[in-house]
Image (spheres, rainbow, N blue to C red):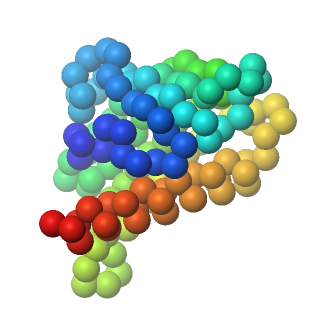
Amino acid sequence: MKDLDKTSGFTGLETSYGIHGSNGELGCIRYCLGCSLPTSDGCAAWSKEKLIAMDEINQTLSYEIVDSNIGFNSYVSVIRISPAATDHGCMIEWSFVVDPVNGWKVEDLVTKYQLGLESMANKMEEAVISI
C-alpha cells in the first residue's frame, strides 16, 4: 500500500512528492501538480493531500485535500483494492466526498477520475505483464 502514494501514472498528474512526514505514515502530506482539473486562476492545478487513514488488512487508504488552487473546500477520498470477481486480478474502487465547487458538475469530476483510474489500471497491468 505504501507505494500507492508515488506518482502512479494517473492521467494529468505531472508530479507528486512528499512535503511533510514520511511516505505511508498517517499525517504525511504530498504535493501534486497536474493539468487534468480546471483552476480559477488558469494555472496548473496543484493540491496538498494528507494521508488520514490506512488499513493494510482491508487494503484501503484515505486522504484529504488540505490546500489547493482547484476550488475544493472539502474533499476526502477513499481508495480500496479488493479481489476481482474472476480468479485473477483485483478491483480498484475510488470514492470521494466533495463539497460543490462553483462552476463544476460532479459528473464531470467523476468522468475525469474514471478515465484517470482506467489509465492507471492499464499501466499497472502492462507493468505486471512485462515482469
Q: In this orientation, which residue lies closer to the viewer: 125 or 91? A: 125
Q: Residue furthest front?
A: 130
Q: Where does the C terminus fall, quadrant-wise?
A: bottom left
Q: In this orientation, which residue lies closer to the viewer: 21 or 74? A: 21
Residue at image point 33% right, 75% down: 84
Give coordinates of residue 70: x percent, y percent.
66, 27
Give coordinates of residue 54: x percent, y percent.
29, 40
Q: Is residue 11 left or right of residue 72?
A: left
Give coordinates of residue 95: x percent, y percent.
52, 51
Answer above or below: position of 84 versus 55: below
> Dividing the picture into quarters, in which one does residue 87 lie?
bottom left
Q: Residue furthest bottom?
A: 86
Answer above or below: position of 100 versus 56: above
Q: In this orientation, which residue lies closer to the viewer: 43 or 75? A: 43
Residue at image point 19% right, 53% down: 57
Q: Is residue 112 left or right of residue 10?
A: right
Residue at image point 75% right, 33% down: 101
